[in-house]
Image (tube, coloured by chain):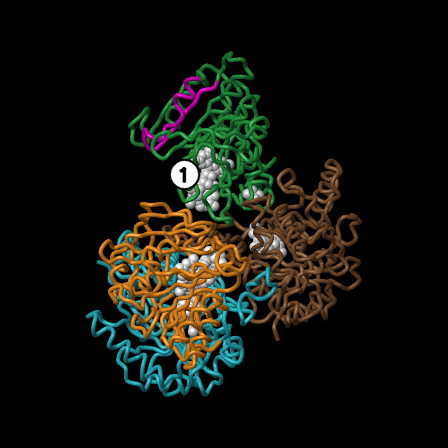
Chain colours: A orange, B green, C brown, D cyan
Amino acid sequence: MLDEKSKVIEHADRGEGYRLLALYSPQIASAAMPGQFVHVKVPALEASALRRPFSIFDADAETGTVRLLYKRVGRGTAALNAVKPGEELFMEGPLGKGFPLECTGVPLMAGGGYGVAPLYFLAKKIMALKGGVPPSPELFVGGRTKADILARNDFAALGVPVAVATNDGSDGDKGFVTVPLDRRIAALKAENEPFTLYACGPDGMLKAVADRALESGTDGWISMDRHMICGVGACYACIQKTTSGNARCCIDGPVFAAKELVW
Amino acid sequence: MLDEKSKVIEHADRGEGYRLLALYSPQIASAAMPGQFVHVKVPALEASALRRPFSIFDADAETGTVRLLYKRVGRGTAALNAVKPGEELFMEGPLGKGFPLECTGVPLMAGGGYGVAPLYFLAKKIMALKGGVPPSPELFVGGRTKADILARNDFAALGVPVAVATNDGSDGDKGFVTVPLDRRIAALKAENEPFTLYACGPDGMLKAVADRALESGTDGWISMDRHMICGVGACYACIQKTTSGNARCCIDGPVFAAKELVW
Amino acid sequence: MVDMCVDLGPVRLATPLATASGTFGYGTEYMGAVDYSCLGAVTVKGIRLDAWPGNPMPRHAEVPGGMVNAIGLQGPGVGMFLNHYAPLYETAFEQTGIKPPAMIVNIWGGTVEEYAEVAHIVAGSGFSFIKAIECNVSCPNVKSGGHTFGHDPMILNRLVSTVRKDLEMPLIVKLAPNVPDITPYVKACEDGGADAISLINTIPAMVIDIERRKPAIANKTGGLSGRAIHPAAVKLVYDAHRASKLPILAMGGIYEAKDAIEFMLAGASAVALGSAIFSNPGVVREVYDGITEYCSRHGFTAVRELTGALEIDA
Amino acid sequence: MVDMCVDLGPVRLATPLATASGTFGYGTEYMGAVDYSCLGAVTVKGIRLDAWPGNPMPRHAEVPGGMVNAIGLQGPGVGMFLNHYAPLYETAFEQTGIKPPAMIVNIWGGTVEEYAEVAHIVAGSGFSFIKAIECNVSCPNVKSGGHTFGHDPMILNRLVSTVRKDLEMPLIVKLAPNVPDITPYVKACEDGGADAISLINTIPAMVIDIERRKPAIANKTGGLSGRAIHPAAVKLVYDAHRASKLPILAMGGIYEAKDAIEFMLAGASAVALGSAIFSNPGVVREVYDGITEYCSRHGFTAVRELTGALEIDA
Ligand SMILES: Cc1cc2nc3c(=O)[nH]c(=O)nc-3n(C[C@H](O)[C@H](O)[C@H](O)COP(=O)(O)OP(=O)(O)OC[C@H]3O[C@@H](n4cnc5c(N)ncnc54)[C@H](O)[C@@H]3O)c2cc1C
Ligand SMILES: Cc1cc2nc3c(=O)[nH]c(=O)nc-3n(C[C@H](O)[C@H](O)[C@H](O)COP(=O)(O)OP(=O)(O)OC[C@H]3O[C@@H](n4cnc5c(N)ncnc54)[C@H](O)[C@@H]3O)c2cc1C
Ligand SMILES: Cc1cc2nc3c(=O)[nH]c(=O)nc-3n(C[C@H](O)[C@H](O)[C@H](O)COP(=O)(O)O)c2cc1C
Ligand SMILES: Cc1cc2nc3c(=O)[nH]c(=O)nc-3n(C[C@H](O)[C@H](O)[C@H](O)COP(=O)(O)O)c2cc1C
Ligand code: FES
Ligand code: FES
């Protein structure tokens, strides 16, 4: 872990309230693994403001680039919005325990809103591992409405099929992401095909995916989103109950095995 | 007094560390009198930051313009520096008791550093009163070095003669502003010409001018620079000892009669 | 339309917003910049029997999140206050046509008896707009003054009951924040017959000018006010509300409507704006509008329903 | 070259900079981001006899000028600490080649006897880098815990003398800030045989989520830390320094060198960085450099000359 001064390369809109921030952060870029995150000091905030954690959407060791996909929700992300290419910010990373890359069967990834961020990096790394031979990852993405379905083109460019569900039915299935996911799980089970589940997004969705992993007896890797203070394991603010007690999301996670989690 | 939202019209450099800020502030502009000040909410500072007081360097009721001449000294004036034409800021004013315009004899004005700010407005108003007929005001200005001698051209354009003194002798007399001032006072006394003293600047200079008013038995009007909280007489932070007790610089002053002041 | 009227015990206020003592002079200084129609009350600067010169200069220092002050309670005596400042307040409003907000007169003294004397003089003065007395037992800037009274529950109880005796005006007692537990102090006020308490006064603090290696304030130490103290103030109001039924006038770092609403949810009947007015007199209107907006959005028809409306899980 | 070595009573520290308990884990978490060569000491998270789960989530809320936390002292018991975390600290430094900063072990307990037991276990553990015990008698988040100990000078005195008895390690006592006057507490520590005191712990505080009308933190109340509390902390250090000769480890809102220097001028022998590290681990280096620059500029050849060097006019 280090605290790297990172220069903003690009800051692009990604639809309503979402933005993609690309930074030149060569040390973090070369160490990053999928599911890990960075802790960003937002330049315009006062000295006492806490850092904000963001999953690594993409990291490229060759170009030294780290990309983040974030949603504007409160004052920290609002202030981050104002950051311009050429400006520098401090970023601790790469932090936390990410997703294991080795998996059994088809990697089924469920994301909600900005929860797709770590899944893109994960899909990319898994595909690089396997050299593109099937079973390749499949993405199931949910959102309130069409505008919350992010990074679709990025996944498509990787060759990852994307199944969509929206609460209002404006895109894909109407309902939760579990609608297309359950369909796919049923199909794989019918064919006796093994699969591994990955999830990142709102708590309700995470629990639903974790339940499916337990029911199916497959591995499920769940990335938890907890408010953080330090991001490095020093403060014990970011607790997740697990079968072995209170774990810290920032260092024991954010990715946990579905079977460890206590809800 | 009111709190007027004021638009920045111009923000010009005036030599090392000094700047002239012109604002569209029609209500303050039309009510302002020389020696009064405004209390500026510096936009970039945090919500709890106190306002900063600045003398009115110039106010023009017709164009609705208020001009301030300020020196960058600390974090408030540093933040003010970043303000750009077109931006708006809140300004309470006009505040305080200014200089009386009626005077006996030649108005001799002594200023140090940014202390010339209220004197320019004063000279302008006195000359407007008198229609330009002598005895017209004379300015005596002091500073550490040549760069601290401000607004010379502005006074010259009014037709006010400017005598300079610098501590390092880089401009005018070497020494304090009292060097040319005492010369002039001696000359006027020799001719039995009456005069009135006005001063704004560092405490040492103010005391020197006040002493000369008392010794000469003439009127002396001294503008005090005290740290302020409210600027409107509500908090009692800005105390100046006077013959009638603790007075508030922001509302009982900033201009006091030399004979009232207790040093 | 939200009913903005509140009762601070026996004191009916047109709105829950007041100003905090020492930050609003004698009530008229901010005319033109503050929207007085949003104010239910104005609390004036601390008054004692005789005039008091206050502390030497400098009297304050700006700090992140607020300021530290040691004004030292400079003020005219109660006589001068009633002869000069109170009539000024009355006439100032005659000109504007706005109904004057209730005036709360903040008092202090060197002895229990002096407190009582000042209170009775004010109560007997006959100004119809003076609606309550606020006893400052907690100013950190005057050593011989309120300090000891506010930090010993027994002395506090004696002070309150002495002042209260035969006083024909509601009595608010303003408590100090730097205590392990506010409960015994609140109880001392309640038992002594106080009609309400106000919380919090400034937190004792100090700023050092490291270049001169001297205290930045002539009095050496002072009181911290502003944003910085708000979370501590909310905790004290919450504790006081649970400790007794005394109505609470809450203050400490209100800079936006949210801050005032927190206080009310924690148990305050009314709230006072202090340091925020210095940097932004428009804050009075902003907080007022923010509270009405909040009430409408959350289905409260009267602002007083906010008092103590915090939901606590068992 | 400024001599940066200081003595916190019997504890010699290579620099006057420490980290504050609870903000720096068990000492190794910030490796890579914090410059450990600037640290004279690391204070680890509070340890008790047995493991402790801490409070429910959420455990903190950001506020202007800092944060309010109610972690609730989650931690392994002293056994696990000594078997796992202390050796981890040792080996982590073996790899880096940097000399490990002194470790101060922060402890707490439910009874006076538990405090003493934990202290003696730590003192007898034999790790050469463990140089002192810091007794937390003032955590606002654990009701059955330190709260009462720190707020009654008599109980405090008994606690300190019980822990001190036969303890072969320097003892620092960490005091609570929310007291009318710190003097009796400092004296209780001094009389009980403490080697130093540390000041200040967090200030009790509360944040309310007005949209949900619930406390923002599951524990309802917590402790305020960060910039906001610095001026209050300076005052307490100043008072404590005048009340006794006990050396002081000062903390509370150090965000820049100036803040640390204020503490030392007010009387601290060493200072600890806490919340500031969360937002900027580089602050350790910045404060270190700022102090040496200040000393050079003001002609101090040793940083310890700053302690109590405030000039007070008579
Ligand atoms: C491991 C991890 C990875 C994340 N990855 C992403 C990502 O890739 N893209 C993205 O858009 N967001 C991500 N988040 C959430 C993101 O950190 C929050 O949306 C952001 O901190 C909100 O800050 P704010 O100031 O705008 O919101 P505010 O609500 O104003 O924040 C106030 C406080 O609450 C905390 N906070 C608020 N919401 C969250 C939250 N959901 N999680 C943690 N802390 C919160 C903030 O840190 C701050 O202390 C991630 C969170 C975690 C823990
Ligand atoms: C009536 C009056 C008229 C003034 N007119 C002018 C003017 O025309 N041009 C100009 O350049 N300056 C003027 N000043 C001084 C100006 O207000 C200060 O230079 C400015 O407030 C410094 O702010 P800062 O944040 O940059 O400095 P900092 O030193 O960082 O300020 C920190 C704190 O100290 C206070 N402070 C610092 N210096 C002064 C000072 N000299 N007077 C009052 N408060 C101070 C600030 O308000 C703030 O609270 C005037 C002051 C007064 C009282
Ligand atoms: C400059 C100043 C002067 C004050 N004078 C008094 C006073 O005379 N009497 C009193 O009871 N409180 C006094 N206070 C305390 C305030 O009334 C209030 O309790 C405190 O400032 C907290 O509110 P705030 O954070 O909104 O300012 C003073 C505060 C300030 C800032
Ligand atoms: C998240 C957090 C956890 C803390 N845990 C402890 C603790 O376990 N024991 C203790 O004595 N103090 C604890 N503290 C208090 C700090 O050690 C320190 O006294 C306080 O935060 C003030 O310093 P700061 O403003 O620099 O953070 C904690 C503070 C924070 C912010
Ligand atoms: S955020 Fe500090 S331990 Fe996880
Ligand atoms: S600054 Fe408040 S009375 Fe003058």
Question: What residue is at 56 percent from the left and 21 percent from the top?
Answer: B62
Question: Looking at the picture, how far across and down is residue B83, in whole percent?
Answer: 43, 37
* Residue D223 shows in this picture: yes
Give residue C206's position: percent from left, percent from top: 47, 57
* As drawn, C132 above or below D158: above
Relative side of A148 to D100, left or right = right
Quadrant that contains the C terminus of chain D: bottom left
Q: Residue at x 48, y 80 (%)?
A: D157
Given the image, on which type of amino acid does mark 1 rest? Ala
- Which is more toward the observer, D235 or A200? A200
Q: Quadrant of ligand 3?
A: bottom right
As drawn, which residue projects farthest toward the front?
A191
The answer to whether C155 appears left or right of A186 in the picture is: right
Front residue (pair A84, C264): A84
Q: Is residue A155 above or below residue A86?
A: below
Examine the structure image and report whether residue A12 is included in the region drawn in magenta. Answer: no
Secondary structure of the residue carrying numbered label 1: loop
From which residue to which does the magenta span run? B137-157
Dot 1: chain letter: B
Dividing the picture into quadrants, the one containing residue D259 is bottom left
Q: Nearer the viewer, residue B64 or D254?
A: B64
Mark 1 vs ligand 2: CB below 8 Å: no
Residue D7 point in image, percent of width and height: 30, 70
At which x and y percent is residue A211? 47, 75
| Quadrant position of residue D101 | bottom left
In this view, B33 is above or below C19: above
Residue depicted at 64% across the width and 69% down the height: C185
- Report which residue position mark 1 lands on: B82
